[in-house]
Amino acid sequence: MIDYAVLTVELETDPNAYGYAALAAAGNDQGQADILNLRRSGITVYRNDVSRGDVIGALSLTDYDALPAARRGLMDAVMRMETLDASNANLRANVLSVFAPGTQTRASLSALAQRQGSRAEQLFGTGARVSHQDVAAALGRG
């Protein structure tokens, strides 16, 4: 959900020097929204759409075979999920804790849980997108 007070501050102060002011002066709300929605290096978000296939593909059979029964049971439950929401900190921590630090699987799952994100996602959460109507509303024109 877009917090318009936060969006207003972002657009008016441009803390990362993305260049909102020139677009605002031209009345280009879509251009400002595009800047906010652009995925960028340096912005990392936790994914909310990790597929079962991705999880299975990240497993090292050696690591999996070495798991005690209780931890294997948790991992089996995770592998039955259609998608894994790695943006849920507790779920992410529980899944990573199944495998010992330094194991290939833990490193692979940790990397899989993240992706390059946008400024909109950094401000409002994984999957957030800002529309031109949101920009107009934040700037008092909508």
Image (cartoon, grey):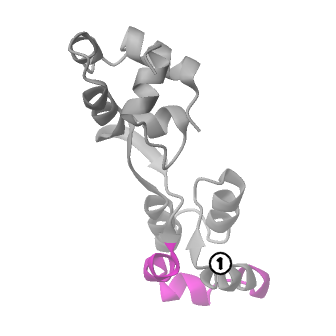
Q: Quadrant of the N terminus?
A: top right
Residues in magenta, as a range: 51-71
Q: Residues within 10 Å of mark 1 (few under 14, many from 20)?
A: some
Q: Which residue is mark 1?
A: 78
Residue 64 at x, y = what percent? Answer: 58, 85
The image shows a total of numbered marks equal to 1
Identity of the residue drawn at 67% across and 64% down: 97
Which residue is located at x 29 percent, y 31 percent?
30
- Give the prevailing secondary structure in the magenta stretch: helix
Q: Any magenta on residue 11?
A: no
Left or right: residue 122 compared with residue 29? right
Expressed as whole percent of the image width and height from the top left, the position of residue 138 reads: 48, 19
- Picture layout, residue 26 above or below residue 92: above
Amino acid identity at mark 1: Val
Report the residue that reaches farthest toward the right: 70
Q: Quadrant of residue 129?
A: top left
Residue 122 or 90: which is nearer the viewer? Answer: 122
Residue 4 is situated, as x and y percent measured from the top left of the image, at 55, 23
Residue 65 horizontal side relative to residue 110, left or right: right
Q: Is 126 left, or right, of 100 in this rendering?
A: left
Q: Quadrant of residue 13?
A: top left
Q: Is residue 45 above or below residue 102?
A: above
Name the residue: 62% across, 64% down. 96
Foreground of the two, 81 or 92: 81
Residue 2 against residue 47 in the figure, above or below: above
Secondary structure under badge 1?
helix
